[in-house]
Image (cartoon, rainbow, N blue to C red):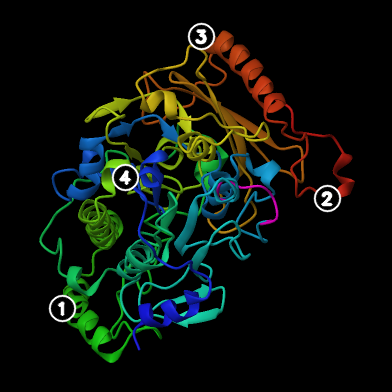
Amino acid sequence: MTCLARAGLVLAALAPAVRPSPAAAEAARPNIVFIFSDDHAYQAISAYGDRLAKAAPTPNLDRIAREGMLFRGACVTNSICAPSRAVVLTGKHSHLNGKIDNRGAFDGSQPTAPKHLQAAGYATAIFGKWHLASDPTGFDAWEVLPGQGDYYNPDFLTPAGKIRCEGYVTDVITDKAIDWLKTKRDPAKPFFLMVHHKAPHRPWEPALRHLHLFKDTIFHEPETLFDDYSGRGTAAKTQDMSIAKTMTLPSDLKVRTPYHNKRMTPEQAQAWDAAYGPVNEAFRRADPQGQDLVRWKYQRYLQDYLRCIRAVDENVGRLLDYLDEAKLAANTVVIYSSDQGFYLGEHGWFDKRFIYRESFRTPLLVRWPGVVKAGAENDDLVQNLDYAPTFLDLAGVPVPAEMQGASLRPLLEGRRPADWRTSVYYHYYEFPAVHAVRRHYGVVTKDFKLVRFYDAASDWEEWELYDLKKDPQEMASVYGDPAYAKVVEALKAELARLRVLYRVPELDPDAPKEAERGKRGGP
């Protein structure tokens, strides 16, 4: 029995009977499809026109941008997987929704956008990565990956238990989403569908059909690949997320033969070995060292990362094609984003977590036929904090006062509110932990970025300031430069205002009770 057949049996008792859809009910409120990937850098979407655009085009993602709006100022509140997902669901900053880092479970009993939409008559479903260590709530149908999930032959958690599906995870997730649209939703209701891809999360394992993609491509190196961090402070110098030191040859870059993981079938493993074996042997013979080794690792990393992106792009195309085929596209808002940005060699890094540009920014593409002007672009400061209010506003559902974001609907309609924000607040908490990125929070405007790095267990702190107009790559902090004294004063006042506005506690939510020793949260 196929995975979808088993899933159909699992959900049969939960899904309403499919019946003819009244045209008036279908057209009354827009459907919403939210496609969310994991660690997808905006640099890897060709519509953004970055250095990888020509070498690794993404035609289906570009289609959303071409037929809708591309946001250039989209960013996150906390650049790490589970907290970002919690922000998207709740419209509240990490300290209020309770998910400040990847540890512990999300409290699914709290109000979320899917719950509000479900109560307002929407059919709701989620398929793919969840990563919140608790069962999804507010969904009529759900099948989610356990934890990070697997690229090959993945397991899915369902309301009736765990099932295993043969195939490549990006394809399987899309199969499930399309199958729900075709056969399991109530067609009398508008729908809210979340399609959450695991890709391109580490360890960047491509689909079999893409194992030879880019094998002859030489990707352009970022100017900052060999950054020595001389213009920045302790946090940049002590991180553990570099291509040179952190990225491993055996697991990250598949330099071992055979490369078999327990999920692969013998046929899948054979295909892997046939693709990587000759390249690995050539690498061993060449035995690159020093910067040559970093360059080799960068190229292999980009090959595998962008191979994973190719499958995401193909499956976005499959979903868009189905909406056309089912005559649903005209009344469906399609949103594509990622849980945060990602480093593709900039500053010698991979991963995310920092408030610095490539981690902080996230792709955001929105198509709304008949409303969003085709080919539009927006450079306002928007955050994943705004997604939940936007979902509700699109559906005509009142946005609860507890949600801290702002609906993007006016921007989508070409109306920029006079009081639209001119600064955003960011806060990263997961330290000490993997990749050793220090805790920090800050305020970002279009022109400047002020950051406070701190240690929750001591009085250590360091401040950094970046002039984003003069130094867009954030290579040299100008904090302490007398020429920027008034800028620092103004930004510290703005940072204090935002912390009050968003009700940020003086002590981190995970601080021990005895941490009254200074209340170091203020700027």
Image quadrant holding the C terminus, namely top right
Q: Quadrant of residue 474?
A: top left
Q: Are marks 1 and 3 in contact (CB under 8 Å)?
A: no
Instruction: Give whichever of discs 1 and 3 has the lower sequence position.
Output: 1
Whether residue 111 appears in magenta in the rendering, the answer is yes
Can you tell which mark lies on residue 225? 4
| Label 2: how many Cα within 10 Å (few below 14, some 14–19, many 20+) | few
Residue 272 vs residue 438, the one in the foreground: 272
Front residue of this view, candidates 118 and 340: 118
Judge whether 29 appears above or below 104 on screen.
Answer: above
- Tell me the magenta residue range: 107-114
Which residue is located at x 66 percent, y 16 percent? 493
Residue 504 coordinates in the image, percent (x, y): 72, 33
x and y, in percent, of residue 21 in the image: 36, 55
Residue name at image x 22 percent, y 59 percent: 314
**Mark sitting on residue 483:** 3
Q: Which mark is residue 512?
A: 2
- Amino acid under label 2? Pro
